Image: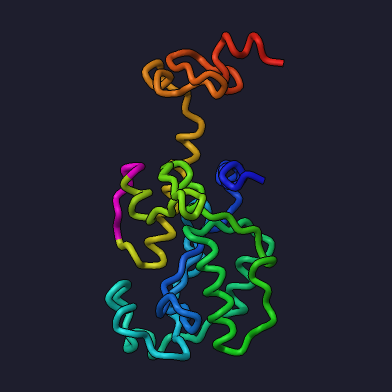
Amino acid sequence: MNKRIGILDVIESKDFLILDTETTGLNDRAEIVSIAVIRSDGTTLLNSLVKPVRPIPPDATRIHGITNEMVASAPPFPTENIFGLLRGRNVIVYNAQYDKSMLYRSAAAVERYDVDWTYLADWFCAMEAFSEIYGEWNDYHGNYKWQKLSTACTYYKIPVVGAHGALADCQMTLKVCEAMLKASQKTPTESEFALIGCSECGATGQPLTGGLCPQCFAHAD
């Protein structure tokens, strides 16, 4: 399925959760130090610091501001709680591949290998969807260049508040999702039609039917 179409359908249904994490880094031994989950209406279901097995490196603290002292009395990775929240749900994440990998790594750090996070829920990546909309193609990788959450917020004129905080990032991701859906439902103005080319002949400035200008549509099989 086209993931962008898929995620827009999920956003329109209003039947989804948004998840975000902050971590100790990007390597294979990285762990979650903060996790948040909200509903599609913005209600917070989970917002917790997490005590990792290994210390938080200074480089990670400089990004999200979470110190070893702050997590000293925090609970370990709450596998059961997260399992109960996500099971069978649609879950939207800004960079779903990364956060899923962190769920696996953090569960493994506390010796919990019994949850297959990939199949626990239906995952949708808001970053991949927005990157396609943003349209910066990467020839080397053969796909659209991934864009930061702050870039998506700026694109849709959403204030960037509390970036690199799990709950704040969930809330901004929700607003980006709502903006993507609204933009997909917008009818182009006459001036915007001038920028849209016929998929067959490339002619601009004309109303399109199925992506075709009136002349090409008339001769379509």
The image quarter containing residue 90 is bottom right
Residue that appears at 44% across and 90% down: 54
Give the side of residue 220 with respect to residue 154, left or right.
right
Q: Position of residue 66 (x, y in %)?
A: 33, 79
The image quarter containing residue 160 is bottom left
Q: Nearer the viewer, residue 129 or 221?
A: 221
For the C terminus, which image quadrant? top right
Q: Position of residue 144 (x, y in %)?
A: 47, 48
Give the side of residue 164 with respect to residue 43, left or right.
left
Give the side of residue 220 with respect to residue 69, left or right.
right
Q: Nearer the viewer, residue 90 or 7?
A: 7
Q: Position of residue 78 (x, y in %)?
A: 55, 80
Residue that appears at 47% across and 62% down: 44
- Magenta region, main secondary structure: loop
Range covered by the magenta-colored residues: 155-161
Residue that appears at 56% across and 69% down: 100
Residue that appears at 62% across and 13% down: 217
